[in-house]
Amino acid sequence: MDVLDTTIRFSIGLEDVDDLFDDVRQALNNKKD
C-alpha cells in the first residue's frame, strides 16, 4: 500500500480534549511543505 504525501494519519486514545486539539495544532504547524 502506497502512502501519499496528502495522507493524514490520525490516532487517538483516551485523552483530554484540550490535549488532542493541542496535538492537532502542533502537527498542522509542523507539517512538511
Image (spheres, rainbow, N blue to C red):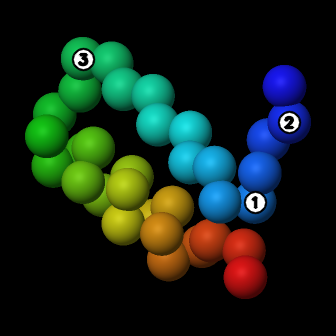
| Residue that appears at 24% across and 17% down | 14
For label 1, the residue is 5
Between 7 and 29, the one nearer to me in the picture: 7
Residue 11, image x, y percentages? 45, 28
Vertical placement of residue 20 versus 28, above or below: above
> Which numbered dot is residue 2?
2
**Callout 3 secondary element:** loop
| Apparent side of residue 30 relative to residue 10 in the rendered image (left or right) | right
Q: Residue furthest right?
A: 2
Q: CA distance from mark 2 to mark 3?
A: 29 Å
Q: Residues within 10 Å of mark 2 (few under 14, many from 20)?
A: few
Residue 19, quarter of picture: top left
Q: Name the quadrant of the C terminus.
A: bottom right
Single out the mark in the foreground, 2 or 3.
Answer: 2
Tag 3 near tag 1, CB within 8 Å: no
For label 3, the residue is 14
